[in-house]
Amino acid sequence: MESSAAASSSSALPQSVALPAGDYEVFMSFRGPDVRNKFASHLYTSLARAKIRTFRDEEELQKGEGIAPSLVRAIPDSKIYIPILSEQYASSKWCLTELAQMVECWKQGKGHIILPIFYFVDPRDVRKQQGSYQQAFEQHAQKHSPQTVIEWKEALREVGQMKGWHVTESCSEGTIVDEVLSKVESHLMSMYTLVTDELVGIDTPVEEVMELLDLGSSDEKVIVGIHGMGGLGKTTLSKAVYNKICSKFDRCCYLEDVREALAKSDGAVSLLNRIISTILKADHQVKSVSEGINMIKERVSKHKLLLVLDDIDDKFEFDKILGKLSDFSAESRFIFTTRYKRALNFIPECKFYEPEEMSRHLSLQLFCKHAFGMNNPPEEDAEICGEFVEVAAGLPLALKVIGSLLFHRGREFWEEKLKEYRGIVSTTENVLQERLKISYKDLSHNEKQIFLDIACFFIGDEKDLPYYMWSECDFYPESGIDTLIHRSLMKLEKNNRFWMHDHIRDLGRAIVKKEDVRHPYNRSRIWSTDDALDMLRNRQGSERVEAIQIHGYGNEMLKSQNFEKLSGLRYLNVQYRQMMGDFSQVLPNICFLQLHQCASIPTNINVKKLAVLDLCSCNVKDNWKGWSGVKAATKLKALNLHECRELTKSPDMSKCTSLELINFMWCHKLEGQIHIGKFKNMKKLLLNYTAITELVISGGDTGNLQRLEEMDVSETGLTELPAGMENLSSLKILSLGSWKPANYWMEIPRLPRSLKRLSILGPSFGVPNLLELKELEYLSCTKGYWFLDDFWQLPNLKELTLTNLKKLSLYLCESLIDLAGINRLESLQKLSLDECRSITRLPNLSGFKNLWDLKLKGCIELTGLEGVEGLESLRELNLRDCRSITELGNLSGLKKLRRLTISGCTKLVEVNGLDELEELEYLEMERRMRVKCWVRSTARYAVGLCFFLVEICQVNSLHRST
């Protein structure tokens, strides 16, 4: 944005400003003289009235620093970008710089959205830089570097291809402003959600906590403390309340494991940074508690805030962490959970809530879900099930863990364990941990090692790298993890990340601490950074130490001499430190070496047993002396060089024939060839966001890569794959293509029939043998996949048996007219059509017996949904901007429907059958609609943005949220 002739927002914009980063949800970019006092002002006013924080002009700015850096920093902090591309937009270098950064943020896939408005300018002129845009670039070419000009042109090409709004003489600017506002509100509505377990008996506690929160009052802030013994379900309850009310607040923040965070040396500062960054939606790093409290007072407290801190202890003091309660908005609400009721005594004006133990009926139901996989016990087992329920004492976590331990076990085992549980003599403090320990004792030696490793180090981490270590140690992780999951001691979340309940984590760490209560350096695992550094400084420790973790910033220099006594160490994780010395004679059993963002790392690592080398974000270069040692690591199975930005070529790993995983993601400078043909054991190859231009395979074919399961070559310099791709019989996941025009994949080779997930970026003529991919479960196609229009109309469609396809997502398939034959996909669970603007009809949907999620957005020519009333498994129906739909039919048959969203369907005038939907929990209808609907008086609803409903009948317990 420039002042004077080319200002984004005002010709009178001051020359020196500072933007408060993170204060905005929407970033508007425009050239002031073109639109400031017209369209932009109208749109800004509408967004402001809707309480949407929008950056626009000098009223939001403060003096202090150069304009360009300030504004460019604001862009990543906003969620939604609205560039108003007018006749003279391209004449502003600041507008073009902003646009380039918007596109860059959007490509990173972190949820940013671009909503372009073409204001009296043809989108083709923007896309191809014609007319005034051509004239502007003739001037820029004389003043700016060729690389800068290319980046600006690419950004215009990207945005010029996006669907937005075209403002002309014949259209109503007011209508377009309303449409933009609706689109922004729709995106912001779904910003905050938390995942919770399947809930049993949660409704009453949620209602009781909400009553204490008194959301209808704006006179005073409210704090609710949920307290009770471990395993009572406090976290689950707080998440359920958060999900139900978060949309009513300007800013929301939910943080888990606060007690553990505060126990660290920099705990209070780290916690403040998490709170501030989450609320302001930007990365902030305060250096002291007082600085953090001041920032909260100046930047956070003014908002209508919902803050939930899970698992605090009696060391938590509100004033010393968050500042004065009086500084916060009267409409703010706080929820704290704790095992210690006394911890709430330090929190001013706190309302106490203690969940009751589960009733016998609900306890039995939860126990049976895990012991039998059903809600009620078999008749012959009813009595012993009742005895186990008594032993669990109404604690949900104990019910889950005990039930899982007994699953598929014989009667004798049940009776033996019941006797063991009854024999526990516990105080109130350790009752849960003692019950959980029985499940731990029943594990094998190898399973115990994996359990303790996860509890101490790997919660939240992906499973791949620890698996390689455990395999090398003969712990058999596949069967071990399977056992831990079935015993409800852990879970694998999305992206295969480890999750463990905090009480189970505490059990694992307590077991390790008991190995030597007084001396941490004699324990098998040291997860405390302070304990680990003390041990290393004093050159303590012994062969009993198996694993060490050192996290957080620090100036310590770790020398090889510090590790001399740690001959049994198999796992070392170090962050933000320097490591120096001769490491060839120490750590003889190191199996997993994880060094993140270390300024200097050893060049002579002992690689005799090394299975995993993880140098993520380290400053390693092509001439790093350590490569000579690494390539001799014959047992190396995983090499992670993610975000090693100084690498320009692939290191020689030809002798590391055991490699199963190579990760070069985000090594931007990495270019040229990468040789992969000798890696016969390769399972995962990640090259995305590199400049690699060629994959070289020995012998010219893919015969040596028969174990390859996942390959990501998206956003690279590659424009083709090696011959013989269809012969990769193990390949299940493939990502390819690019958004950059120079790297478009116009041809894709024949692909292996084993594929289950296929993701393609950018335009293409299609996959030659797509019909043969019978195992395909996930297909993601973006940006103009016109070949899909023919795909569903091929004459041999009767032979198409994609029986395993579970999710189909089509985005920007502009030429797609219909999906004839899609109803043959009987296993389909999720169907999403986004901006498929030419599609006019869908086949009868009643055959989709497994479909539970149907999303249709921007399908402006779609006229109806035939057979939707037969979708018996449907849980969520989301219709947005489907302007031609006139009727939905009767929805009374959707007995499992929980969420219904209808927005921008301007011709839809009536929705019938809602009074029969007993499971419906959420109903949203957008502000411009005039819809008559009937709903059940006994159901639980949140009605969002229903400003102009003609009639809602029979509603007694309907909560309205605006």
Image (cartoon, rainbow, N blue to C red):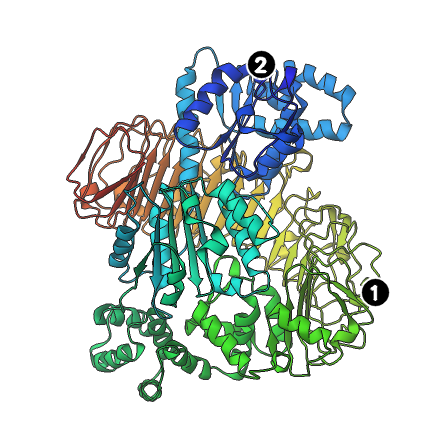
- Label 1 and label 2: CA atoms lie apart by 61 Å
Mark linked to residue 187: none
Residue 528 seen anywhere in this rendered image of the structure:
yes
Q: Nearer the viewer, residue 205 or 812?
A: 205
Tags 1 and 2 in contact by the CB under 8 Å rule? no
Looking at the rendered image, the quarter that the C terminus falls into is top left
Q: Earlier in the sequence, mark 1 or mark 2?
A: 2
Answer above or below: position of 619 versus 541. above
Q: Is residue 340 left or right of residue 604?
A: left
Residue 607 location (% of width, % of height): 76, 72
Tell me which amino acid carries mark 2.
Pro
| Residue at the far top in the pictured view | 169
Location of the N terminus (image quadrant): top right
Query: Dot 2: within a 10 Å radius of its alpha carbon, few (fewer than 14), some, or many (20 or more) residues?
Result: some
Q: Amino acid at mark 1?
A: Ser
Residue under numbered circle 1: 628
Query: Which residue is tagged 2?
Result: 33
Element carrying mark 2: helix
Q: Nearer the viewer, residue 566 or 461?
A: 566
Residue at 68% from the left image edge and 77% from the top image edge? 569
Q: Identify the residue shown where x is 38% and y is 66%.
A: 342
User: Residue 378 falls in which quadrant of the image?
Assistant: bottom left
> Where residue 748 appears, x then y in whole percent?
62, 43
Whether residue 858 is visible, yes or no, is no
Tell me if mark 1 has few (under 14), some (14-19) or many (20+) residues whose alpha carbon lies within 10 angstroms of its own.
some
Q: Position of residue 840 (x, y in %)?
A: 38, 30
Residue at the spot 83% in from the left edge and 65% down from the top edge:
628
